[in-house]
Image (cartoon, helix red, strand yellow):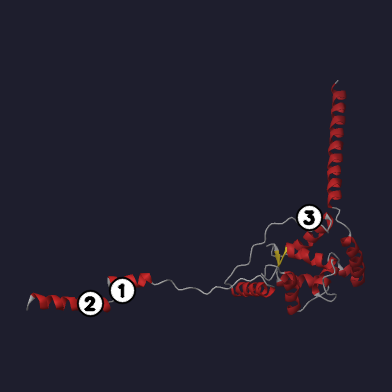
Amino acid sequence: MSSEELARKLQRRLDAEQRDPKPGSPAQTGADEEQPPPVRPSTAVNGDASSELTEKLTRRLDIHDGTAKPNQMKVFNPYTEFKEFSRKQIKDMEKMFKRFDSGKDGFIDLMELKLMMEKLGAPQTHLGLKNMIKEVDEDYDGKLSYREFLLIFRRAAAGELQEESGLMALARLSEIDVSTEGVLGARDFFEAKVQALSVRSKFEAEIREEQEEKKRMELERKQRRAAFKELQSTFCS
């Protein structure tokens, strides 16, 4: 075989290998590396209300399916955020929240809300309880945080709750022992409470009163100490 014929055969073989590379060959590997990664479909973000609602509903479904976690509630100061309430009112609401948070996890879940409404004398159906939570459940975790609990009273004071809703019943009967005062007493109390909630917050005045009380106690303590020292010096002389 002549050298020219051998060269032509080698050239044809090289051309064939280039056109049809074997699996795992450098040419095939390079082709795979050059392929762009698959593009994942993305959701267009619009500023309109329908897009925002769609995103909220999608996130709620993801949280329900366990594919997403609810946002952690940021630490808030109820006295500065809920200025329409007095310090005493907020403290009373906090006591009520902690009293029915039997799990001591900082939330009132569906079962705890059920027991609360039964204790207040306004039992709700399972669907009614879910609707109560849904009305103020800002993070879609299916339970009430302390802040969401305060939102119930804010909306009640602002007249934003339906008259026959479960949340309105909760606000009406809160801090009332219906077993001793009865439903009529609860209704009268709520009417007076609504008037109190509509008054401008007395936060600053209450702070000053607390400070003045501390000053009076400190002054009395100093006076007692001085009187004791004087009496002690009389006995020692």
Q: Quadrant of residue 92?
A: bottom right
Q: Tags 3 and 2 in contact by the CB under 8 Å rule?
A: no
Farthest left residue in view: 1
Mark 2: which amino acid? Asp
User: What residue sits right under mark 2 in the picture?
Assistant: 15
- Looking at the picture, which amino acid does disc 3 mark? Tyr
Residue type beneath disc 1: Gln
For marks 3 and 2, give the CA distance.
82 Å
**Element under label 1?**
helix
Which is more N-terminal, label 2 or label 3?
2
Q: Residue at x 79, y 59 (%)?
A: 82
x and y, in percent, of residue 57 in the image: 65, 75
Mark 1 lies on residue: 28
Task: In the rendered view, tell whether residue 118 sits above or below residue 103.
Answer: below
Judged left or right of residue 63, residue 41 is: left
Q: Which residue is mark 3?
A: 79
Residue that appears at 73% across and 72% down: 133
* Quarter occupied by residue 104: bottom right
Q: Earlier in the sequence, mark 3 or mark 1?
A: 1
Classify residue 39 as left or right of residue 199. left
Give the SS element for disc 3.
helix
